[in-house]
Image (cartoon, rainbow, N blue to C red):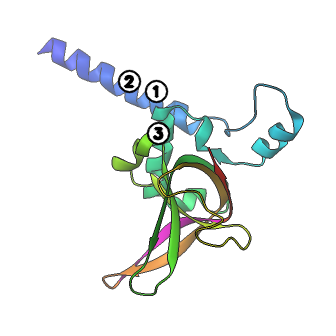
Amino acid sequence: MKKGAVACFAGMLVVVGALLCIDSAPKQGGTADGDAAATNAAAAVDFDFTSMNATVRTAYAYRLGVNPREFEGKTVRISGSFLTLVDKKDGKRYFACMMGNSGGCACCAPGGVLEFEPKGSLKWPDDFPRAESRITVSGLLKLVEVEEDGQRYPVPRLFDADVLPL
């Protein structure tokens, strides 16, 4: 019995420690090679999911899913699989990035799939990468109110997004 309590307490310490590290994590960005242009571009990103390890990325993706207002108005960069679909109701084409390596944290954390509106006047399919190919997307995160089954809720979406194939 005593052994189980110690293991439980140790587990709680690990979780609390991880949460403290996540909350106090510095803004992500920057490069190791010292390239000034890349450093300036990276510094403009508030949340750079591409430079986070898998554990921190999953935690932030979860936070994005359950509290999207925390990220509203921030510049976000993510990498993952390019997704697109057409809404059968209104015929509009939507674009998204499923975060992580081959889906990464998308299966277990809300926020793992992020919609985006591309910058400029890109034409589908000529100006876009192949579906399910790896991309990096960065843009300004705004909340869009969506109604489903009579209820409204905020959905995070990147606007004026730069889309780069990996």
Dot 1 falls on a residue whose secondary structure is: helix
Q: Examine the rendering and report whether any part of residue 76 can be seen.
A: no
Amino acid type, label 2? Leu
Question: Label 1 crowding class (10 Å Cα cut-off): few <14, some 14-19, many 20+?
Answer: few
Q: Examine the rendering and report whether any part of residue 120 can be seen.
A: yes
Number of marks: 3
Q: Are marks 1 and 2 in contact (CB under 8 Å)?
A: yes
- The quarter holding residue 119 reads bottom right
Q: Residue furthest top?
A: 3
Question: Label 2 crowding class (10 Å Cα cut-off): few <14, some 14-19, many 20+?
Answer: few
Tell whether position 156 is magenta.
Answer: yes
- Residue 17 numbered tag: 1
Q: Nearer the viewer, mark 3 or mark 2?
A: 3
Q: Mark 3 vs mark 1: which is more N-terminal?
A: 1
The picture places residue 30, in percent across and down from the top left corner, at 75, 35
Amino acid type, label 3? Asn
Quarter the C terminus occupies: top right
The picture places residue 27, in percent across and down from the top left corner, at 68, 40
Q: Residue furthest left?
A: 1
How far separated are the C-alphas under marks 3 and 1?
Answer: 25 Å
Kindly identify which residue carries mark 3.
101
- Residue 6 numbered tag: none
Tell whether position 165 is magenta.
Answer: no
Q: Main secondary structure of the magenta part?
A: strand
| Pick the front one: 148 or 84 | 84
Kindly identify which residue carries mark 2.
13
